[in-house]
Image (tube, rainbow, N blue to C red):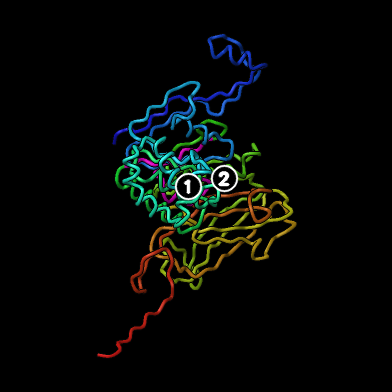
Amino acid sequence: MSVVLDVSHVGKSYATYRSNLQRFANWFGASIAPQSEFWANRDVSFQVKQGEAVALIGQNGAGKSTLLKMITGTVRPTVGSITVNGRVSAILELGLGFNPEFTGRQNIYQAGGLMGFSQQELTALMPSIEEFAEIGEFFDEPTRIYSSGMQARLAFALATAKCPDILIVDEVLSVGDSYFQHKSFDRIRQFKAQGASIILVTHSMGDVRALSDRVVLLDKGTILKDGRPDEVVDYYNAMVFEKENAKLAIRQRRETHGWAVTMSGDKRAALVSMKIRDAVTAEELKAVRVNQLIDIQSEIKIMEPIHRLVVGHMVKDRTGHVVWGTNTWHTKQVLTGLEAGQSVLVTFRMLCNLGPGSYGVTYNLVSTDTRAEDNYDSCDNYVVFDVINLDRPIFVGTTWLDAKITTEVIGK
């Protein structure tokens, strides 16, 4: 596949000078050192291939928006180079380029012209844009009376009026109703199938897992990780909680079965073992039948005195989506006053009403309902098991529903 975007050692610096005179002098070639300098991005390099969907993730202030503005050409990099091969269509900010006094139709002509469309093209595309936006009579009303969701509909309909070589979407799909979000994601998938490259910026890790082939994690303006979605997203989720504590190093490995294992925690309490057993026979299982009653049994060793222990489990599917999860905080089974040297045995019993496929069990040993306060020990996909369907009617999906179908023929 050909490379449609090449970002090479890009950095963006914002300088503060003692006076505007010094700033102006630098514009005309003077070499005056700034009073201070802030690098929004530094030494960022990555490529996007044709038909590839890449998600940019990171906490607020990580440099995602600045990087997108440089890719689209609205901001020039201080150092490095960006090479774009093809037409870029971008939605960077809600209503960017819209005049609030213009109607939706008038803004399509204005903003579409700035995107490189001719008036004739926009006239031809107008019916499909109006149909996709689904804002009815508001299409010919001033955009100042639009809700944020209506602006998102109009902006997305314009940006995707024609399949671009590169589509850039920055958070705008988090605005508005779920119906339009699903509709927009369907169009993104269609463009990807047609060979368009997608750059997605969002805080929704579910969207990242569903749409992206690759994930780039930015932190303090630099690339911290670039790789497969499951690995990078799990690392990011751990990083959010561990960032402020140097002791809580994040460790990762990829097992032979292909699952990414992400570990963190200070080990004041540590998981010794976890086994999946048949709840009736106690037989250890590697494969579980649909609708089988199973126990997820864990042994935990207390390494240092802890005031409170909460044990949590999550079951994820192969794409990383959480299909089930809870912890002893929510079930009101919190353990307190634990001493070093003690062991804790925990059994989660559940009816495995999952669909056929591969699943991973994630555990968290914490002191509250999240890892924000104390993270003793956490691991994504510590145990992986397969679910097989041996005695149920054939069905699709990640969940077995004990559904009954009745049929009745009426009349001739």
Instruction: Kindly identify the amino acid type of the residue bearing the numbered disc 2.
Output: Ala
In this rendering, the answer to whether 214 lies above or below 128 is above
Rendering coords of residue 185 (x, y %): 41, 52
- Along the line of sight, which residue is nearer the eye, 243 or 157? 157
**Is residue 243 found inside the magenta-colored segment of the image?**
no
User: Does residue 205 appear in this view?
Assistant: no
In this rendering, the answer to whether 171 lies above or below 18 is below
Instruction: Kindly identify the amino acid type of the residue bearing the numbered disc 1.
Output: Thr
Q: What span is colored magenta in the figure?
A: 196-218
In this rendering, the answer to whether 354 lies above or below 409 is above
Residue that lies at the very extreme toward the top in this rendered image: 30
Rendering coords of residue 339 (x, y %): 73, 54
Does residue 181 appear left or right of residue 147 in this picture? left
Mark 1 → mark 2, Cα distance in angstroms: 45 Å
- Along the line of sight, which residue is nearer the eye, 40 or 100? 100
**In the rendered image, which residue does mark 1 sit on?**
103
Q: Residues within 10 Å of mark 2 (few under 14, many from 20)?
A: many
Precedes in sequence: disc 1 or disc 2: 1
- Along the line of sight, which residue is nearer the eye, 135 or 316? 135
Name the disc covering residue 238, or none.
Answer: 2
Task: Check contact, mark 1 vs mark 2: CB within 8 A.
Answer: no
Residue at x-position 51% and y-position 60%: 275
